[in-house]
Image (spheres, rainbow, N blue to C red):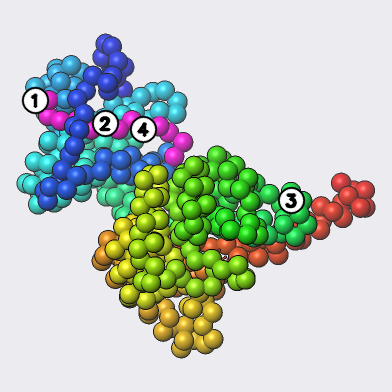
Amino acid sequence: MQDRRHDLPGCFDSREIPVPVEVVNQSGRPVSLCRYRRMAGALLRIAGLGHMHLGLLFTDARGITEINRQWFGRQGPTNVISFPMEDPGILGDVVICMDRAAKEAEQGLTTLENRVMELLIHGLAHLMGEDHELGDEHARRMAEKELELRDSLIMEGLMADLCINVDHIATIRQARGGNEPDPVLAAGIVELAGADGVVVHLREDRRHIQDRDVRIIREVVKTRLTLEMAATDEMIGIASELKPDIVTLVPEKRQELTTEGGLDVKSLEDSVADAVKRLHDAGIPVSLFVDPEPDQIEASSRTGAECIEIHTGRYADAPGAAEQDMEFEQIVKMAGMASDLGLRVHAGHGLNYMNTARLAAVSEIVEFSIGHAVVARASLVGLERAVREMLALVKGTA
Ligand code: PXP
């Protein structure tokens, strides 16, 4: 496909194009245009073009008619236009006409959201060099490419995210009171390894993660940061200032080795709802760490939190296969119930290399938070290398 941008005088300038302020779907609900930016990022990754930049613009019939007139000498609106770029690092721009997308969604008996996704994929396939206008063979190849991209996108959507809790890197540091190993460096390594996010638990007693850790990790994390914390005034103040991507409210007892049970949202509904509101006022989404029990999940949905994290401790610690099966079934049931109530479902606690895969197949669980098992394994699989490096120093062979 030719670079039309370079065929034409001037330069495509998205600032001249009217952008719809609010787009609503067939049910009158607002359509989040941001999700298509995330989708475009995922599509680029899937296509092996994750290093490239893609401009994405939504406009209305008036806007796309103007682009057609100005750039192609064509009359009237079209649904999508791709502008390839020859610059290294920039794939090009895709402009989507929301009016046309809405009309086509109606005609094709699909949702507006789905039609916009199809148009985004179509526009991207053009930027990847496909062009259905060049003949039947090209049209068939392009259709195949679009199907492949759509299937991969759906598969990616079905995969849960993995966020790694680096508390226990700090636990090792605190054992000597020095500054190594640094959970800040661990957070960077976790991201380099491909994790979808980093989790830290700032406990009231500061037994592992320190205030300084959260502050610097907030600055360096490029994926997303989950801050686990108790719903206290002090912690809400810290979170409001640091603005993690999400807060997970957990219960905290001073004497416990780790978070032993879920937050009792049923008994503490009013105070939890108040904490959720204060965090929302600071622009922070909230997840509640709860046991897989119906009344806890119902209470959670009433607090206004957008998410729950199912406490998987009972499943992880089940004494036998039968008990574990029972706990598994309970988690599946509760994940479905929470999802039906409109809550996003995360899961965590005690998950390891033996018991995680089974839960990863539960489609309602969209995120896992895992810490101890990963840090424990890292200490063993990294031990040999660490010994070899010290041997080289002692033997003078470094
Ligand atoms: N989720 C929550 C809310 C937790 O409190 C913890 C433990 O800090 C985890 C997940 C991770 O548990 P683990 O360290 O056992 O993987």
Q: Mark 2 Cα within 10 Å, few/some/many (few <14, many 20+)? A: many
Q: Secondary structure at mark 4?
A: strand
The three-letter code of the residue at mark 4 reads: Leu
> Which mark's residue is nearer the viewer, 2 or 4?
2
Q: Determine whether label 2 and label 4 are within 8 Å by CB.
A: no
Image side of residue 316 versus residue 101, left or right: right
Q: Determine whether label 2 and label 3 are within 8 Å by CB.
A: no
Residue 54, label in figure: 4
The three-letter code of the residue at mark 1 reads: Gly
What residue appears at the point 39 percent right and 68 percent down from the top-left corner? 268
The residue at which mark 2 appears reads as: 57
Residues 269 and 372: in front is 269
> Which mark's residue is nearer the viewer, 3 or 1?
3
The three-letter code of the residue at mark 3 reads: Glu
The three-letter code of the residue at mark 2 reads: Leu
Q: Earlier in the sequence, mark 3 or mark 1?
A: 1
Q: Secondary structure at mark 2?
A: strand
Where residue 222 appears, as percent x and y from the top left, is: 51, 42
Question: Distance from label 3 to label 4 (Cα)?
Answer: 40 Å
The range drawn in magenta is: 50-62
The residue at which mark 1 appears reads as: 76
Q: Mark 1 Cα within 10 Å, few/some/many (few <14, many 20+)? A: few
Where residue 275 appears, as percent x and y from the top left, is: 40, 56
Query: Ligand 1 closer than 8 Å to the CB at disc 4?
Result: no
Q: Earlier in the sequence, mark 1 or mark 4?
A: 4
Where residue 252 appears, as percent x and y from the top left, is: 54, 66
Residues 31 and 94: in front is 31
The residue at which mark 3 appears reads as: 180
What residue appears at the point 70 percent right and 62 percent down from the top-left corner? 379
